[in-house]
C-alpha cells in the first residue's frame, strides 16, 4: 500500500513536468521539462522512502529510475 501512496505523492509533486510509472519495486519518472522539474523535492521524497535512485538518458530525455531498498 505504501508504494501506491508514494506513487500518488510523486504524481502530485511532478505534475505536468514529467510522468511517473510504477515498475517492479520502484518507479520510472520521465522528465518532460528539465528546467522546471522539482528535482530536489522529488529526490528527497524518494530517498526518504528508502529508494535507490539512478538517473539515465533515454532518447535524449532524462529519466529517474528507482528501486525500493531491501532492508
Image (tube, rainbow, N blue to C red):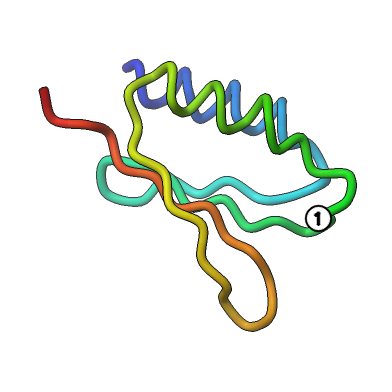
> Outermost residue toward the left?
71
Q: Give above or below for 28 relative to 2.
A: below
- Place residue 61 in its image quadrant: bottom right
Q: Give above or below for 62 relative to 12.
A: below
- In the image, 50: left or right of 27? left
**Crowdedness near tag 1: few (<14), some (14–19) or many (≥20) residues, C-alpha within 10 Å:** few
Q: Residue at x 57, y 72 (%)?
A: 57
Q: Residue at x 60, y 21 (%)?
A: 9
- In the image, 47: left or right of 33? left
- Place residue 63 in its image quadrant: bottom right
Give the percent coordinates (x, y) of residue 32. 78, 59
Which is nearer the eye, 66 or 8?
A: 66
Q: Residue at x 67, y 25 (%)?
A: 41
- Place residue 38 in its image quadrant: top right
- In the image, 3: left or right of 36? left
Which is nearer the eye, 7 or 52?
A: 52
Q: Give above or below for 62 relative to 46.
A: below
Q: Quadrant of the C terminus?
A: top left
Q: Residue at x 47, y 18 (%)?
A: 5
Q: Give above or below for 59 relative to 35.
A: below
> Outermost residue toward the bottom?
59
| Residue at disc 1, secondary structure | loop
Residue identifier under label 1: 34
Q: Quadrant of the N terminus?
A: top left
Give the percent coordinates (x, y) of residue 46. 47, 28
Q: How many marks?
A: 1
Give the percent coordinates (x, y) of residue 64. 53, 52
Give the percent coordinates (x, y) of residue 28. 48, 52
Amino acid at each position: 500500500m505504501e508504494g501506491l501512496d508514494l506513487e500518488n505523492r510523486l504524481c502530485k509533486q511532478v505534475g505536468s513536468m514529467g510522468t511517473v510509472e510504477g515498475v517492479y519495486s520502484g518507479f520510472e519518472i520521465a522528465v518532460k521539462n528539465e528546467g522546471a522539474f522539482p528535482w530536489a523535492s522529488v529526490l528527497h521524497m524518494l530517498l526518504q522512502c528508502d529508494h535507490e535512485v539512478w538517473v539515465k538518458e533515454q532518447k535524449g530525455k532524462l529519466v529517474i529510475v528507482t528501486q525500493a531498498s531491501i532492508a
